Structures are given as C-alpha cells and as structure tokens.
Image (spheres, grey):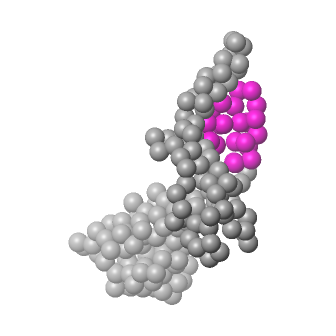
Amino acid sequence: MYGVPAIAHILVNAEGGLDQVVQSLRGYDDEDAQAFVRKWDSVSKSDRERLTFEEIAVAAGVHTLELLAAATKALFLENQTISAIIATTSHPEIVRSTIKQAKEPGGHRDRQMLHDAMGFTPTREGATFITNRVQVANFRGLPGQSIEGEEEGENPEAHSVPDLPDFDDEIQQMDTIEKRLLEGRK
C-alpha cells in the first residue's frame, strides 16, 4: 500500500462515518463508485474489519483520490436532495406560519415579505401584480365575451391599454400610517 493516498481519515468525518459514505456511493452513478461498492459487498464483514478502506479501493481497481472525489460528490448530491425534500415538504407549513404571524399586530416584516413574494410591493416598473389583475379584469373581459371595439378572435394585445395609476406613493403612505398605528402614534 506504499504510495497509495490515504482517504479514510477524511471520509470518517461524514455524519454517519464510512457506513454513510458507502451508502452514498451506492446511489451515485459513477464507474469508480460502483466498482468500489461491488468490491465492498464481495468482502465479508470480518474481512472488512481487517482491511482498510484504501485496500478495498485498490482491490476494486479504483484510485483512492478518484474514490474520494466520487464520495464527496455522492455525499453532496445525496444531502442536497434530502435538503430539497425537507424544504419542499415543509414549505406549506412555513407559509401558513408566516401568514399567521403577518396577521398579528407586530407582523410588519412578515407582511412585507409576503407582499414582496407575491409581487404586490411596488417596484420601479410599478406594482405588476395589481396592474396585471386590473388589466385582466377590466380589459380582457370574461371568456366568450368580446371587448368593446374588438372583433371575435382578434388578438386583445393588439389594442392599446390605458396607463394605470402609479400606486407607489399610495402604498408607501399606507405603509407609513400602518407603522405609526403599530407604534401607537397617530
């Protein structure tokens, strides 16, 4: 084993140790990873206790530094996927909690975050959420209805839409009033 780079001392730092590394390698579609796992599975448990991780890698025909790279990628991808699953399945509960807090008198930051997330907060381009809702409600009509001056089947985007008022000043003024009320001032 002279000249073979040691990697086990690095991999034992994985949350579940070398067992977790092997499990992650099982789910990683990489030639070196799969060659190592095949060799690992062919070695008896008692032999695994006497052999080093590096010796098993060499017996599998895998360079230890290549196996280290594969293990790092496998662990990263596995944990990234686990994190995405946790975040995705927890998101509705977090949104409910955020909305509940936003409805409380001290929930100003939660309200602001929800407004930002929904595109309700004005930007330099204007409040697109409000603008789009007004345009849909006022200028396109209901399905099956034509808009005044529009022929059936004609593209409604071809007609000019009047400019809507800029809500920035009104919303900022309402925000200032809300802050004063929350602070107990008039």
Q: Is residue 97 left or right of residue 46?
A: right
Q: Range of the magenta residues? A: 94-119
Q: Considering depth in this image, is 24 or 98 the residue closer to the camera?
A: 98
The outermost residue toward the front is 149
Can the viewer see residue 64? no
Residue drawn at the location 36% of the way across and 66% of the way down: 7
Can the viewer see residue 154? yes
Q: How many marks?
A: 0
Q: Is residue 42 left or right of residue 60?
A: right
Q: Can you say whether 175 is above or below 72 in the image?
A: above
Q: Considering depth in this image, is 173 or 12 the residue closer to the camera?
A: 173
Q: Quadrant of the N terminus?
A: bottom left
The answer to if 114 sits in the magenta stretch is yes
Q: Quadrant of residue 177?
A: top right
* Image x and y of residue 99, in percent: 73, 42
* Image x and y of residue 83, in percent: 57, 59
**Magenta stretch, overall SS:** helix
The outermost residue toward the top is 185
